[in-house]
Image (cartoon, helix red, strand yellow):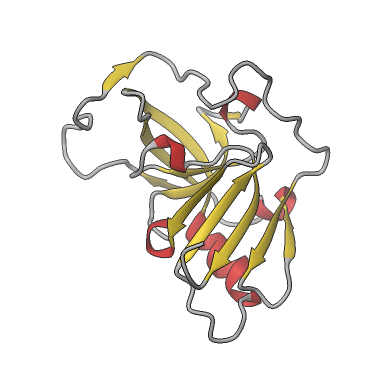
Amino acid sequence: MDTVPYGSMPEKTLPPGQRAIEGFPRFGTHLHAPPPAVPSDPVIEIGGAVVEPISMSLARLATLPRRELTADLHCVAGWSATALQWEGVAFATVYREVIEPVLAAGAPITHVVFEGLDRYRSILQVEDALRDDVLIAEHLDGRPLDGDHGAPARLVSASQYGFMSTKRLCRIEVHTAEP
């Protein structure tokens, strides 16, 4: 398994205005309700500028090369959960091995939309989505993700604020223009 350290500076510093916290709290727009139920056989639908939409089961995802990533998660509310240990598959690997083979011929992909079971969506430019620190994670700190942190799988885009890291990932769309 490939391990990718977060940051290239010998001593990490938090972004301006951030404070380190203990633990990693559940955060989201619907804290008064429980997380959405995880389907018994979860899949990630792939659509947009593809020849035909496909479904990638989490069993298929698990067959792709794994990697670990140690990264901080910075919330726009001003807190940072530090040194989180994520495990999953680099999005770049998913893109190359699963998405590229079904792209429409000549489609110049510019944006990727990630959608969760709760209908939350984040949009990344394709260059950002393909960075080394972007994973589809299924484990956090050596354990499978729980509902509060995005089970069964979530996007982790370590160099961006946490709201870009869509939880409960169920759909990926590729686009030739900003959606």
Q: Is residue 175 above or below residue 80?
A: below
Residue 45 percent across, percent down from the top left: 71, 56
Residue at 67% x, 61% y is 46
| Residue 42, picture quadrant | top right
Q: Quick one: 152 or 48, which is closer to the camera?
A: 48
Q: Evaluate whether residue 159 shows in this view.
A: yes
Q: Quick one: 24 or 121, which is closer to the camera?
A: 121
| Residue 120, picture quadrant | top right
Farthest residue to the bottom: give it: 106
Residue 84 percent across, percent down from the top left: 42, 29
Residue at 46% x, 64% y is 178
Residue at 61% x, 56% y is 172
Farthest residue to the top: give it: 22
Q: Is residue 102 above or below residue 173?
A: below
Residue at 53% x, 31% y is 140
Farthest residue to the right: give it: 40
Q: Is residue 65 above or below residue 115?
A: below
Q: Quick one: 39 or 6, which is closer to the camera?
A: 39
Residue 126 percent across, percent down from the top left: 43, 64
Q: Is residue 78 above or below residue 50?
A: above
> In screen coordinates, is 134 left or right of 93?
left
Q: How many marks?
A: 0
Q: Evaluate whether residue 1 shows in this view.
A: no
Residue 113 percent across, percent down from the top left: 54, 56
Farthest residue to the front: give it: 179
